[in-house]
Amino acid sequence: MSARLAETFKYFDLLDFPMFEKISKQSEFEPFGELSKIIGGLKQGDLAGVITTDQLTYAYLLHLALSSFPGNSYYLDVSSKISSKILESIGGNPDKVFFARVYSIKDVISALNYVEGNSLFALGSINIVGIDSSSLLQLKKLIGDKALWGIFFIEEQSLNELDLISEARRLLFLPELFEQLIVARTTYYRGRYKLTVTVLRTYPERLSSLGDHELIVDEEIKKILSQSTEGG
């Protein structure tokens, strides 16, 4: 190594470079209860994508994530799909959840300026706010810069179940940006509610969870349905 190069490395400590971080320091958060025990928790600064095929599954996974986070949660959507009563019924604290309506990707990026670091950032209906590859990359960078846990939700009732990979690309443009990516549906059979999940992407240490999983979510779904009849 030349003397000049050695001198350069003396003043350039790679570990202090803003773009780099020690992966051992990443905190994890389990947003989806028993499902997270299968696919693993979401790491800080990372992004999960959730595609649902019905409104009930959307409500279940959204409220589960918001109620599970110990700190402040910020939820953005074009319309309110959240209920304080449902949050309380499954153990959440509505006082820690902040909601804002957004109508464009510009609104979403502007709203991120008001999101505290180390918080949960949930964005709903991302497929109808004008997302594209460039804005998706910008959102991913902001989530990492602010050390957030990011979850994007989509409800797509006309999903082509025969080609989920192509559907994920149609709805999310760059599915490779998501550390975790799932497709979820809820069915009712023989008096019980069942959550069926297809894991499309996950962390390297959880690759064995790729594919289909079924969980009984009867208790949680019935809590949501009993509260939703009274409104939020």
Image (spheres, rainbow, N blue to C red):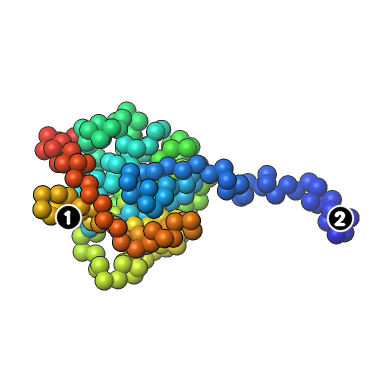
Q: Residues within 10 Å of mark 1 (few under 14, many from 20)?
A: some
Q: Is residue 112 left or right of residue 123?
A: right
Q: Is residue 130 left or right of residue 117?
A: left
Residue 116: where, in percent of width, then height? 45, 35
Image point (53%, 44%), residue name: 26
The label shown at residue 2 is none
Quadrant of the snapshot with the C terminus: top left
Residue 63: where, in percent of width, then height? 27, 41
Q: Which of the 4 image quarters holds residue 161? A: bottom left
The amino acid sitting under disc 2 is Arg
The label shown at residue 187 is 1
Select label 1 or label 2 by which is in front.
1
Q: Is residue 130 visible?
A: no
Q: Residues within 10 Å of mark 2 (few under 14, many from 20)?
A: few
Q: Secondary structure at mark 2?
A: helix
Image point (34%, 37%), residue name: 68
Q: Is residue 165 left or right of residue 159?
A: right
* Residue 162 versus residue 99 in the image, above or below: below
Q: Secondary structure at mark 1?
A: strand
Q: Is residue 167 left or right of residue 8?
A: left
Residue ID for mark 2: 4
Q: Is residue 36 visible?
A: yes
Q: How far is mark 1 from mark 2, CA to CA?
A: 66 Å
Image point (35%, 59%), residue name: 199
Quadrant of the snapshot with the N terminus: bottom right
The amino acid sitting under disc 1 is Thr
Q: Most extreme residue toward the top, as rendered?
A: 95
Image point (73%, 47%), residue name: 13
Residue 65: where, in percent of width, then height? 33, 42
Q: In the depicted view, which residue is nearer to us: 141 or 70?
A: 70
Say whether marks 1 and 2 touch (CB < 8 Å).
no
